[in-house]
Amino acid sequence: MNRPTLSHIYEGEVRDRATSSENLSTRLELNRRYQSADFHSWLQRRLNVSRGEHILDVGCGTGAQSLRFLDSIGSHGSISALDISSSSIEELSRSANFDHRLQAIAADMAALDDVINSRFKQKLYTLAHSSYALYYSPTRLNVLQRMAESLLSHGRLAVFTPTTPHGMVEIASRFSAIPEPVIESLEFGHSVLEPRFRSLFWEVEIHFFQSEMRVTSLDDFMGFYQATTYFQADAAPEIRKYADSEIGAKGSVNYSKNGYLIIGRDRK
């Protein structure tokens, strides 16, 4: 099978920001520092990974979830992780101390079928997972289908995406136009994933993650904004002025950051 050309819903500078391991690390650290609820522990509780599981992690980034999966799968489990960013994969491998239970490959998720067939040692999984990633692919539904097909009997498929209300996007929209793919990503769970999951699985469950960000540092707020796919240099001075005013008046910039998790079990 021929490998598909690398693809992404963004191009050029925006694509670089979307796939940058440095930007990802910035967002993860600032979320950790300022969020009212810990997303990672919330997600892990709902995925309920147990010893001996074989997990496919699509769009794994620097391993925010893969590293946590390693803590749960015991000596006989495995993680097969894929991300478009080679620097993210390198960082994940280093962070995992090149654990033999983890196989991490840099590849476009559009090539998932080829990667599973030709490169991953593990071919079937108890959990196929993707967080903050699937909507970046123009071939997202094909990827989702392949993830479902990779499941062992009674395996589960879990996808997490951002959803509304999304306070940072709302703030940015006051000062510049928000790219259509960003708006679509906030509707992806309800509009695209839910009907597709209900066509694939007998059992579908949905969870909503709710968190409030209270950012007390102007530099941190701007650092987060600059690490997003909707950053606009022309709007940055006005957004900085807004954030400075909020911190001066309230002590922090406060906004919501919510998400949508869908889990499917028992394939039809």
Image: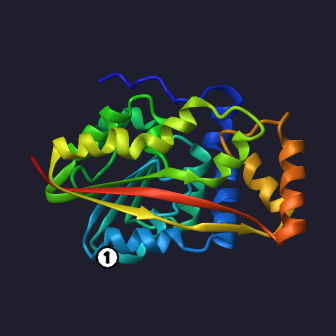
Q: State the SS at label 1.
A: loop
Residue 164 point in image, percent of width and height: 51, 50
Residue at the (89%, 59%) spot, across then down: 245
Residue 40 point in image, percent of width and height: 49, 69
Q: How was this image coloured?
A: rainbow
Q: In which quarter of the image is the N terminus?
A: top left
Q: Please state if 186 lies on the left or on the right of 174 as rendered.
A: left
Task: From the image, tell me which residue sits under label 1.
Answer: 75
Dividing the picture into quadrants, the one containing residue 66 is: bottom left
Q: What residue type is labelled 1?
A: Ser
Residue at the (52%, 40%) spot, across then down: 84
Residue at the (46%, 36%) spot, across then down: 108
Residue 26 point in image, percent of width and height: 70, 58
Q: In this view, does 163 lie above or below 135?
A: below
Q: In this view, does 240 lie above or below 96?
A: above
Q: Please state if 176 lies on the left or on the right of 150 as rendered.
A: right
Q: In this view, does 140 lie above or below 211?
A: above
Classify mark 1: residues with Cα within 10 Å, few (<14), some (14-19) or many (20+).
Answer: few
